Amino acid sequence: MLKLGKICFHIIILYSFYLLGNWIQISLNLFIPGSVIGMILLFILLLIKGVKLTWVEEGATFLINNLALFFIPATVGIIDYFSLFSGKGFLLIIIVLVSTAMVMAVSGRVSQRLARKREGQRSG
C-alpha cells in the first residue's frame, strides 16, 4: 500500500509539470504544446538537480510499463473514421507500418547508445 501511495505521488508530480506546461502555453500563447513545455521543464530541473530523479522515477516507470493501455481509446476511436479508410485505407496502413518501423529503429539505436554510454561510465 505504501508503494502504491508513492507511485501516486510521483504521478501527481509528473502531472503537475504537465499542467504547468499547459498553463505556460496558454498564458504566453505559444505554438508548442503544453505537454512538451512541461516535459522540457522537468528535463531541465532534473539536469540542474532541482528535482531529484527519486521523486518521479517509480511513477514514470509505472506509466511507461502501462503505456499500451493509453492507446486503446485512440485505437477504438478509429472506428468513428471508417469512411476515411475506405478510400485510401491501404495507403494509410502502409504509412503507419513504415513510420512505426522507423520509430522503433531510431528508439532502439538511441537506447543502445545510451546503454553503452552508461556501461562505459560505470566501468570507467
Image (cartoon, rainbow, N blue to C red):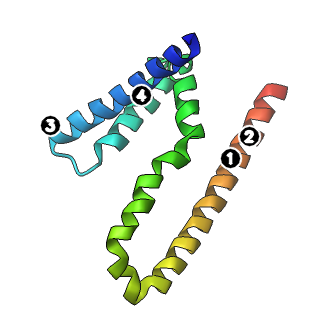
Disc with the residue nearer the chain's start (2 vs 3): 3
Whether pointer 4 and pointer 2 mark residues with C-beta atoms closer than 8 Å, the reply is no
Marks 3 & 1, CB-CB < 8 Å contact: no
Q: Residue at x 56, y 31 (%)?
A: 62
Task: Where is residue 27? Give x, y as percent.
Answer: 14, 37
Tell me the tag on residue 115.
Answer: 2
Name the residue carrying label 3: 27
- Mark closest to the chain's N terminus, 1 or 4: 4
Q: CA distance from mark 3 to mark 4?
A: 20 Å
CB contact under 8 Å: marks 2 and 1: yes
| Earlier sequence position, callout 4 versus callout 2 | 4
| Residue 124 visible in the displayed image | no
Q: Nearer the viewer, residue 71 or 39?
A: 71
Packing grade of label 4 (10 A; few <14, some 14-19, many >=20) is many
Of mark 3 and mark 4, the one earlier in the sequence is 4
Q: Which three-letter amino acid code belongs to the residue tagged 2?
A: Ala
Whether residue 52 sits left or right of residue 32 in the image: it is: right
* Other-residue count near label 2 (Cα within 10 Å), few / some / many at <14 / 14–19 / ≥20: few
Taking the view exactly as shown, the residue that stands out farthest to the right is: 123
Q: Which mark is residue 111?
A: 1
**The furthest residue to the bottom:** 87
Locate residue 73 relative to residue 52 in the image: left or right: left
Badge 4 is on which residue? 14
Q: Nearer the viewer, residue 68 or 17?
A: 68
Query: Label 1, label 4: how many angstroms apart (C-alpha)?
Result: 22 Å
Marks 2,3: beta carbons within 8 A = no
**Relative image position of residue 83 (x, y in whole percent):** 33, 81
Q: CA distance from mark 3 to mark 1?
A: 35 Å
Q: Would you say 115 lies left or right of 78 here?
A: right
